[in-house]
Image (cartoon, helix red, strand yellow):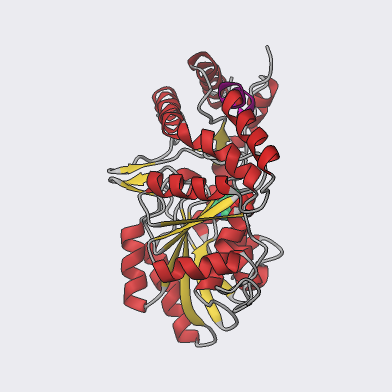
């Protein structure tokens, strides 16, 4: 039996081949490779999808986060609070901006920022007095929106700014509110393996604030002012290629149906696996974008080995929480300081998740997990 892909971009390309190829062809013909018409077309479509006023596309999810920090003026002397259980980019951008990350523990079932511990870390940082608490980066891990209402309450109490790291959650919802509208600024990624991915690097920043949107657009292009050769701030070369915008347009057109297919697969996994392993939490009123379907189990090595033997890929996101990474150790308090993140890193396992995974394959994956968990 052929191996199962962890993320199946080939089947998606087969489905969309005609439109993607035609889009690429059009870009080759008009030749406006930087900020061509497909970029603004995509930005309008993203606003429409997310229900927000501004979508500023950019070169990656990492740049989207950097732009959000730069537009807020975050720099030396600032503390930025973020979960320890995340991808490195969430923390890296804070140090690149000259600020310092303060790692916060996560909730044991949602894997997202724990608002209670967030409040404690802000208080501890304030007491210590070395850094000024300035912002919170709230990550929507694996596609599930964080508790943005509780995080906004903490932010308001302390006058902190909130950036949503929605690199994994574009397409998710809290009630009817789509990702892109849950925080004053939201950053997402179009890395190929994200729920909405291009065929290279890409990202976007979302905001409803007109002034902030102008600053973000300026930062995206080297800090340019309204006059073409006027540079009014330090910026980036942070634009999304026109080619990637042309590839994203047909993908965005089918994205809602893909999100439904991901949710159906998650339901199927739940039905088969609940009881044998800890399946992902479902929170009332929230819809995940299902970037990952991640289970918790005690005998992870054995289960992962059984999956490998059966030709089924799996992944560990994340085997080392940020505060224990060598590059960030100086900003944390070491082993034992963030117990939930540390425990999750030892028990988490992500199963294949994409919209084109059929029921028979899902059942085969579940059979293999169940047999391995049972000690077979
Ligand atoms: C992927 C990811 C990023 C970075 O996005 P890139 O497009 O790869 O730069 C940032 N934060 C999180 C949580 C991610 O998963």
Who is closer to the viewer here, 233 or 132?
Answer: 233
Does the magenta-highlighted stretch encompass residue 10? yes
Residue 342 spot, x, y in % from top left: 56, 54
Q: Residue at x 66, y 68 (%)?
A: 329
Q: Quadrant of the N terminus?
A: top right
Residue 334 spot, x, y in % from top left: 61, 67
Who is closer to the viewer here, 228 or 364?
Answer: 228
Question: From where the camera sits, is residue 256 visible?
Answer: yes
Residues in magenta, as a range: 7-16
Q: Residue at x 51, y 20 (%)?
A: 362
Q: Residue at x 65, y 40 (%)?
A: 27
Please identify the quarter of the rendering in which residue 21 is found: top right
Work out whether 234 lies above or below 185: below
Determine whether, in the image, residue 54 is placed left or right of residue 321: left
Does the magenta-highlighted stretch encompass residue 184? no
Q: What secondary structure predominates along the stretch shown in magenta?
A: helix
Work out whether 255 lies above or below 84: above
Residue 123 spot, x, y in % from top left: 41, 78
Work out whether 77 lies above or below 342: below
Q: Residue at x 62, y 71 (%)?
A: 228
Who is closer to the viewer here, 10 or 161?
Answer: 10
Question: From where the camera sits, is residue 102 visible?
Answer: no
Determine whether, in the image, residue 366 is placed left or right of residue 314: left
């Amino acid at each position: 039996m052929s191996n199962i892909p962890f993320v199946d971009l080939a089947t998606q390309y087969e489905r969309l081949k005609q439109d993607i190829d035609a889009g690429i062809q059009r870009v080759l013909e008009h030749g406006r490779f930087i900020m061509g018409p497909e970029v603004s077309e995509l930005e309008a479509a993203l606003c429409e999808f997310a229900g927000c006023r501004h979508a500023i596309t950019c070169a990656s999810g990492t740049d989207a986060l950097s732009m959000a920090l730069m537009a807020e003026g975050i720099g030396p002397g600032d503390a930025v609070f973020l979960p320890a259980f995340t991808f490195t980019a969430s923390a890296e951008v804070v140090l690149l901006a000259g600020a310092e990350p303060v790692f916060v523990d996560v909730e044991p079932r949602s894997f997202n920022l724990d608002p209670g511990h967030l409040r404690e870390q802000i208080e501890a940082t304030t007491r210590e007095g070395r850094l000024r608490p300035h912002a919170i980066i709230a990550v929507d891990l694996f596609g599930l929106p964080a508790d943005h209402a509780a995080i906004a309450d903490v932010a308001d109490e302390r006058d902190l700014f909130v950036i949503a790291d929605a690199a994994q959650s574009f397409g998710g919802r809290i009630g009817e509110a789509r990702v892109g509208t849950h925080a004053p600024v939201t950053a997402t990624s179009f890395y190929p393996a994200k729920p909405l991915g291009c065929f290279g690097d890409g990202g976007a920043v979302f905001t409803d604030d007109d002034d902030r949107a102008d600053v973000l657009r300026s930062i995206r292009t080297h800090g340019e002012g309204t006059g073409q050769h006027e540079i009014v701030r330090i910026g980036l070369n942070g634009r999304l290629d026109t080619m990637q915008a042309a590839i994203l347009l047909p993908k965005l057109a089918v994205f809602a149906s893909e999100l439904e297919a991901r949710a159906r697969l998650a339901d199927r996994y739940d039905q088969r696996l609940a009881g044998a392993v800890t399946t992902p939490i479902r929170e009332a009123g929230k819809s995940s974008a299902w970037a990952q379907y991640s289970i918790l189990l005690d005998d992870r090595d054995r289960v992962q080995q059984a999956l490998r033997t059966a030709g089924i890929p799996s992944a560990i996101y994340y085997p080392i929480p940020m505060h224990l990474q060598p590059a960030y150790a100086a900003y944390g308090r070491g082993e034992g300081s963030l117990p939930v993140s540390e425990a999750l890193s030892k028990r988490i396992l992500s199963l294949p998740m994409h919209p084109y995974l059929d029921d028979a394959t899902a059942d085969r994956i579940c059979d293999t997990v169940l047999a391995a968990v049972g000690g077979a």
